[in-house]
Image (cartoon, rainbow, N blue to C red):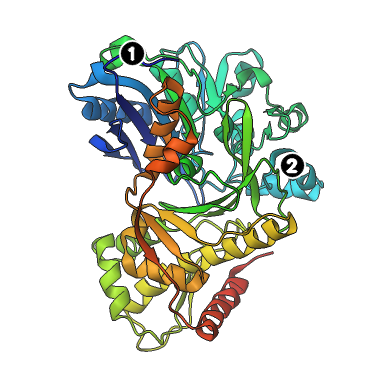
Amino acid sequence: MAVSEGKNLILSIDQGTTSTRALLFDAAGKVRRLGQKELPQIFPDDGWVEHDGARIWADTLEVCKQAIDTDVASIAAIGITNQRETSLIWDRETGEPLCNAIVWQDRRTADMCARLRKEGKEPLVQAKTGLLLDPYFSGTKLAWMLEHVPDARRKAKEGRLCFGTIDTWLVYKLTGGKAHVTDATNASRTLLFNIDTQDWDDEILGWFDIPRAMLPEVKDCCADFGTTDAALLGCAIPIAGIAGDQQAATIGQACFQPGMMKSTYGTGCFALVNTGTALVVSQNRLLTTIAYRLKGEVTYALEGSIFMAGATIQWLRDEMKLIASADETEALAKEADPDSHAIVVPAFTGLGAPYWDPHARGAIFGMTRDTGAAEIVRASLESVSYQTRDLMDAMAADMKAAGLTSPTELRVDGGMVANNWFAQNLADILGRPVVRPEVLETTARGAAYLAAMQVGLFSSPSEVAERWQEEASFTPQMPDPERAERYGRWQTAVGRVLTS
């Protein structure tokens, strides 16, 4: 796809768990304009989390118009990045959702996953999809909707329903229902996609009684995903790049070589390490996933997922009322007693990698009479560092076993890493340098880069890598014995909330 003369801007849609944003990037990768709307979460029951799919679409259209303003004629393409495993079904004819989207955090299918594990299906699931049996992934969410949404099963069998993660939903709406597609990274998070054969897996579809016809076509991350209905944004714009949010951040962080690792601190924390063309099956309960697929060539990654990172700070603000804004956490952490043994285990929606315990619940340990707000805030920030250490240790072990180079530094992004105290604590707990890029908008930027490569504004990933710049580096300062002692306290605390 060749770009027309004068079209040198990329519109990047970043549809996340708590907000929907659109960013207009220029050819240098700088943000020209931003539109954003908060997205409310819906909690119908204990452990259930939903989104209104129609609201997501309406918000997306609104923020795109805000970001575009008068520049629509200069836009070469659209890139999309999205909260990954969040799942939706809709009527193929009307384009209307049959129910709310089930969000990646939702735990309603925990019993279904436990039953499948008991039946001995997890080893085959891991071998085919790289994933584990956990409510986090889309497959069991789709199976639940087909079982519980009135008339959904019949309509699906008649070919009247579409399934998609949020990228698929947005492309469907942007193209006026003409394109039902996804990319390989989002497909790899569904529990239904064989990451070796690069196709939907009929055996797993059979377990869940999911008709293949309701699934989207899977394309490379740079591809022709369709063209927007001209009436929506003022002219027809090609949709040229898609990646799930964490894979988009991997691209935005220019982690193109095996052993390069990034961690994004948004609502959750998601760490990916590039394993190149090697499909490494984890022995430490990490996920094997697709980092990106370009020109038909797959690059794999190991991933660890933490469900509560920025969401823990939101809990401090909204439920505990210990802070008025996230900006206050850095000063409070500095004020806290450094000798406090308070440990926060934020297992509010279970624990992710490497524990995968959906029934674990949050707890605070080690409090004394003088434990106050500052100590709880500090312990909450530390909990994210400890969970990242859990992931990095598991990744290093898997990489070593596969004969690959283990990560020597961590590239970080997301709202939390603007906090210098947290970034330094992260380096101290990891015992490795933590590097913060000049541009923290790595997720939206990664999606923009994909679209730019497809339309010829960028020639290759190496050109993207040349544009990556470091803003700050944090080197470990904590003595080894103290690091070991603190991490040991964390491991003890986690052991007390695990249910299996």
Quadrant of residue 315 within the rendered picture = bottom left
Q: Is residue 29 above or below residue 169?
A: below
Q: Which quadrant is home to the N terminus? A: top left
Question: Mark 1 sits on what residue?
Answer: 4
Amino acid carrying mark 2 in the image: Val
Is 147 above or below relative to 18? above
For disc 2, the neighbor class at 10 Å (few under 14, some 14 to 19, many from 20) is: many
Q: Amino acid at mark 1?
A: Ser
Q: Secondary structure at mark 1?
A: loop
In this image, 318 relative to 492: left or right? left
- Which percent across, then down, holds residue 5? 30, 14
Which of the two marks, 2 or 1, is nearer to us in this view? 1
Q: Is residue 355 visible?
A: no
Image quadrant in which the C terminus is located: bottom right
Looking at the image, which residue is at 19% across and 24% down? 69
Residue 160 vs residue 421, the one in the foreground: 421
> Quick one: label 2 or label 1, which is nearer the N terminus?
1
Q: Residue at x 45, y 55 (%)?
A: 411
The answer to which image quadrant residue 318 occupies is bottom left
Q: Position of residue 394 (x, y in %)?
A: 64, 62
Q: In the drawing, does residue 196 fall left or right of residue 366?
A: right
- In space, the residues marked 2 and 1 are separated at their CA atoms by 45 Å
One can see residue 261 in this view? yes
**SS label for mark 2:** helix
Q: Which residue is mark 2?
A: 125
Q: Which mark, by number, is residue 97?
A: none
Closer to us: 263 or 217: 263
Q: Nearer the viewer, residue 423 or 214?
A: 423
Task: Give neighbour class at mark 1: few <14, some 14-19, many 20+ (Cα, 10 Å).
Answer: few
Q: Please, which residue is most extreme toward the right here?
A: 120
